[in-house]
Structure formats: structure tokens, C-alpha cells
Amino acid sequence: MVVDDLVWQSIEPWMIEIRRGIHRHPELGLETPRTARLVETTLDELGIAHSRPIAHGVRGVLAAERRGPALLLRADMDALPIEELNDLPFRSEIQDRMHACGHDCHTAMLLGAARYLKAREAELRRPVVLMFQPGEEGPGGAVPMIEAGILDGVEAGMMVHVDSDLEAGVIGLREGPAMGSCDDFRLTIHGRGGHGSTPHQGIDAIFVATAIVQAWQAVVSREQDAFDPLVVTVGTIHGGYRENVIADRVEMTGTIRAMSPAARKRAVSRVAEVADGVARTHGARVEFVLEAGYPVFMADVPWTQSARRILTEELGPEAVREIPPTLGVEDFAYVAERIPAFCIAVGIAGPALTTGLHSAGLIVDERGLKAGAAALAAMALRS
Ligand SMILES: [Zn+2]
Ligand SMILES: [Zn+2]
């Protein structure tokens, strides 16, 4: 089994060291120069060729001369604008920035897999492309790397993501619709102001806003198939001046999450339509601005099934679980729209974990790194 290879005894602490170094210096969005440089330096040390398809994204390649389509392995490198609460020796050194989504772990795992694979490069049956991307938490690093040709000659793509619901050492798999789509919106309601004692002389934008919020939930509960999940959340609502003034304007923002492209398309148009219809009914007018986000992540069924078989053999049956889908999003979904792609959830729950991902108190059980790296390496060797 790959996971039992004695070489992990030296790779594992090396990966943890890399992960802690990245954790101390989190970078945001597409601006990950330090992490990209670290990746390049490490690939140089390993003797792995690399290039920069985009400003702060790195492409490495193993067994480049091998014929046949490549397998792409992806790690993201960006952090979140969160102030870290943990008092660890490798705590984030930059205020209001933290690797709270575990992308520090992903980068370290992919480097660990690269080091392992370099030693067994002669056994690789196909080229292996390493994709280190920035901007996963927004505005998206996958699309610019795809446009720069990262998928050229690639047959399938594999990504890892840490999972705080799985214990360290365990990996999770999900085929089909695995992660949701995300579309954010801003709605401005234009009514007409007036005195609070004479609402009939104005058009109350606050009243219209409440009617729209209610009507949107009917789109979810009365129009949507209960077996095809949909969430519409209003996250902010602002309007009004004082207690006795009819508000002429309200602004709301929210997010639409769906688990199928059809539900997504329908929900986006219904949210806009219903807002318009309800506003008209009450004599108001709306402006609806949609900010389309990541699509549904469709994990390829044959590839996920083959990963289940291979990883059960290479990590042991007790280390492989089925996991539920999530309405969280992932920009690797754009890769999955173009080629077969799948995701491995990597358990990082340990005794110190009390909160989940995107939380200022996230404490990763670093024993998970070895399982993630071994999964990447095993798929590269055997698929
Ligand atoms: Zn995240
Ligand atoms: Zn993430």
C-alpha cells in the first residue's frame, strides 16, 4: 500500500513544515506571490519542471515525456480575510488573514505527493500535471489557468479538500453533484417617501422588501423539487431613515445555492421575476443585479468509482468513506465542466478541533496531510 511506504516517515514531517510555513504567511485571492515562489523553490529542489501559466499560479509536470493523456492534481494556495484566534507557534503572522480553509494543507499535500512521485517517476504511466492555483476563495483562479492552457493534454483532474467532519487519516468520496452552485445578488427596491402617518401617500419600500423576502421562500418551498436542493438566503437588508418616515429605498443582498444546473438556472430567474412581480403589485420598482459565481461541481462517476477502488486498496478500507454533498462551492467545478474531475475530502478532525472550516479557531490535525498526499500519489501511480 502506498500509505505504508516507509518514505512517508521523512516526507510527512517535511510536509508539515511546509504547511506551517505557508500558514504563517497567508495570502489572499489571486495575489499569492510568496506561496507561488515557495512552490517553485520546492519543485526546483525536487527536480520537477515548472512554469507560471498566470501571475501567481504554478504548473509542475512529472513524466512529461510519457505518451498518453495526463492526470492533473490540483491544490489551491489562497487564504481568507479572517483574524486567527489560535495561539499556535505557527499562528498567522499577518493580521486579518488566515488559512482557515486549509489551502495551506492542500499545497503541502500536493508537494508531498510530488516528492513521493518523483522517486517513483519511472513507474508513472502518464504525465502528471501539478496545478497550484490562487484565488479559489474568489475571484477564481481556475478559469484563468484553464484559459492559459493548464488542461491541454489532460484527461482528468483530481483535487483534495480538507474536511473538518472527517477524522484525520480518513478520506471521503462523493460522485455526481458533490458541491453546489453559488450566485450572489443585490436587489434595490425603489418606492416613494412620505410621512409615517400617511403611508397611503407613499410607497413603502420596507413593506415591499418584507413581501419579497417572504415570496422568495415560497420559490424554495413551493416551486422546487424537495429532492433537488435549493437555498435562497438574504444576508443583508438596509433601508429607511427614522421611525416616522416612509422609506423610499431598500437594498438587499443575498445568495442562491443549488445542486443542479437546472435548479440553478430556474432559481436565478425566479428570484428576479418574483422580486419584480411583488414590487409591481405594490407600485414599487426594483433593480436586480446578479453576480454569477461558481457552477455545480459534478464529480465524474467512473473516475470517482475508480478512486474508491484504488484508494480502498492503497489506504485501507477503514480509511475510505462516503460523504454527503454540500452547498459549499469550489472553483474546480470549472475544470469539471471541461474534463472528468473528482474530489477527495481529506479528514483533519482531531482532539483539538472545535470549529469547522472558515472559522478563526480552526485547528487542523496534521496527521491528515499524509492521507491526502498518499491519495494524490496513489491515483497518479495507478490510474
Ligand atoms: Zn473556503
Ligand atoms: Zn477551500
Image: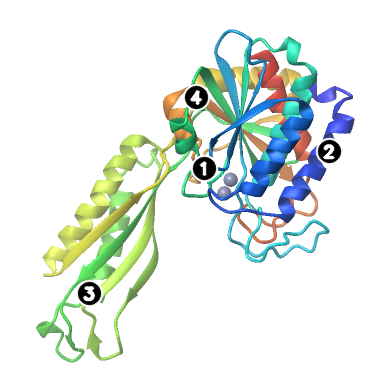
Q: CA distance from mark 1 to mark 4?
A: 26 Å
2 or 4: tag closer to the N-terminus: 2
Position in image of residue 267 (x %, y %) = 30, 46
From the image, tell me which residue sits under label 3.
Answer: 205
From the image, tell me which residue sits under label 1.
Answer: 326
From the image, tell me which residue sits under label 2.
Answer: 14
Q: Residues within 10 Å of mark 2 (few under 14, many from 20)?
A: some
Q: Quadrant of the C terminus?
A: top right
From the image, tell me which residue sits under label 4.
Answer: 151
At horizontal 20% and vertical 64% (from top left) the residue drawn is 286
| Vertical relation: 57 (above or below) 83 | above
Tell which of 293 and 305 is nearer to you. Answer: 293
Q: Cβ–Cβ below 8 Å for labels 1 and 4? A: no
2 or 1: tag closer to the N-terminus: 2
Q: CA distance from mark 4 to mark 3?
A: 49 Å
2 or 3: tag closer to the N-terminus: 2
Per the image, label 4 sits on a secondary structure element best described as loop
